[in-house]
Image: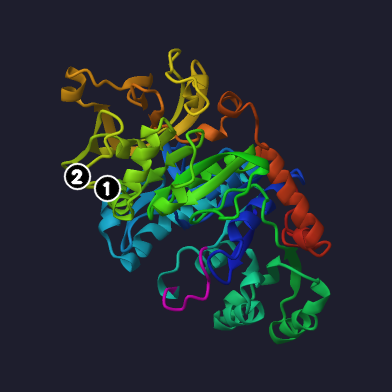
Amino acid sequence: MMAQCVMVLGTTSGAGKSWLTTALCRYYARQGLKVAPFKAQNMSNNARVVASNNGQGEIGSAQYFQALAANAIPDVRMNPLLLKPERDTHSQVVLMGQVDAELTAMPWRGRSLKVWPQIAAALDALRAENDVVVIEGAGSPAEINLSSSDIVNMRVALHSNAACLLVTDIDRGGAFAHLYGTWALLPENERALIKGYVLNKFRGDASLLAPAPQMLQDLTGVPTVATLPMWWHHGLPEEDGVFDDRSVAKGAVNMTVAVIAYPRISNLDEFQPLKNIPGLRLQWVRSPSELAGLQPTDWIILPGSKYTTGDLAWLRTQGLDAAVAAHAGRGGAVLGVCGGLQMLGEALIDTHGIDGNAPGLGLLPLVTVFAQDKTVRHTQTCFAADMLGGTHSNPWATLAGVAVSGYEIHHGQTQQHVAMAAAGDVAQAVLPDGQGWQNAAGNVLGLYLHGLFEDPAVLRALFGAHAPTLDSVFEGLADFIEQHFEAGVLDSLIASQTSPH
């Protein structure tokens, strides 16, 4: 029997689709059902390495977390098409976990016709293996300029006969107009799939909403099935953009970690655990003035980037290159991750048109060469036993000998700058196979390894602390929706499901 599908649609981007899908995955998994997530097409530079027919591939981070919430093994079928923006008008296309150069060069509408068979096959395969598939839409299903080439919203809903929830961000204002307008723009056969409205991010007295929910139901025949209170710190990484700028430390602030938020920042979700470290303030930085008050005990992080040379140019335009160098010159800790590592070196060389050529920041004596083939893999490794450092402002020595697991997604390959090494300026390799480097002073560290702060052993070594587990976050999400949805609604969405696998 094919799985019953529940789909989360939104009136806008940022309405709350991703976290609600994650919560539903855990809710249904707690009922003893075999559950899988699905999103036909995701546009995000936050990606994770998962299983594929070719060994390992990429999917959006949101679907990775949704799979974990469902107690499922993440695989590429859960997000068959991933678009990774590199410019305002250009994205790298990843199909079934692998970069597809032909699709990347293809116009948007032509691409949808070509990829739909593989999207439908991935969804059908998941339905055949599970009791429930929880599907996430993208943006709004009522983008009438895109409906003819839709492969992510109502075409998926119709293909799977999904019971759909339509969620809106009431904190933005205009929620009832958004709900009614979305419903009104859908054709009748698509409207029939909408089973309930969800008001998300509500602040205040819910009784004051009356009589609007009933009026909306009278107009559309669809009930409002949940009013979800605003919840700032649910613990799940945000899918898009820099997650909230309300990052505050738990208790008195004794350390700031400043993450440079350049335009094409990627894999920023890996910093979510830092928000939960006592005494640590996570700060997103876009100008030198935001770094002016940093102490040597504070850190600067250059995160991943989907357009390293472009973000490096932006960093220079903002004057952040000098601010980062000044912090490093005072002995302050600097960490570069993936694209950030590449920026820390002397030069970035591109002979294949992958990313571009650029001089680096010169804080590590390294050279990065961009290769046509992308490295995509899970990595389990161990930091060198002789890590440099040891002062409070230079913390990396505590990583010495620590075993760590994470993932790599990069075109660049980084090596010692030959001439500088010959002159005695040598970077210390702190991870094998070119995965990690440290400067002679010890305070500047560059790694290709993503997921550092998601590893409990690393958190203990660096902070003597731990962050809440992802599993506890998923349980909290499921408890939240169970409390705030109308009784019986969540079970009614899968009422045709007769027995677990």
Q: How is the image coloured?
A: rainbow
Q: Judge whether residue 312 is colored magenta.
A: no
- Comparing 18 with 159, the one in front is 18
- In the structure shown, which secondary structural element does the residue marked by tag 1 occupy? helix
Q: Is residue 302 left or right of residue 213?
A: left
Q: Is residue 189 left or right of residue 76?
A: right
Q: Residue at x 71, y 77 (%)?
A: 222
User: Quadrant of the rendered structure where residue 435 is?
Assistant: top left
**Depicted 113 relative to depicted 293: above or below:** below
- Residue lying at 56% horizontally and 48% vertically, measured from the top left: 126
- Judging depth in this view, the residue of 500 and 413 nearest the camera is 413
Query: Residue reaching furthest top?
Result: 385
Label 1 CA crowd tier, 10 Å (few <14, some 14–19, many 20+): many
Residue type beneath disc 2 = Asn
Q: Is residue 125 visible?
A: no
Q: Residue at x 73, y 59 (%)?
A: 496
Q: Amino acid at mark 1?
A: Thr
Q: Nearer the viewer, residue 184 or 305?
A: 305
Q: Is residue 404 above or below residue 202?
A: above
Circle 2 residue: 357
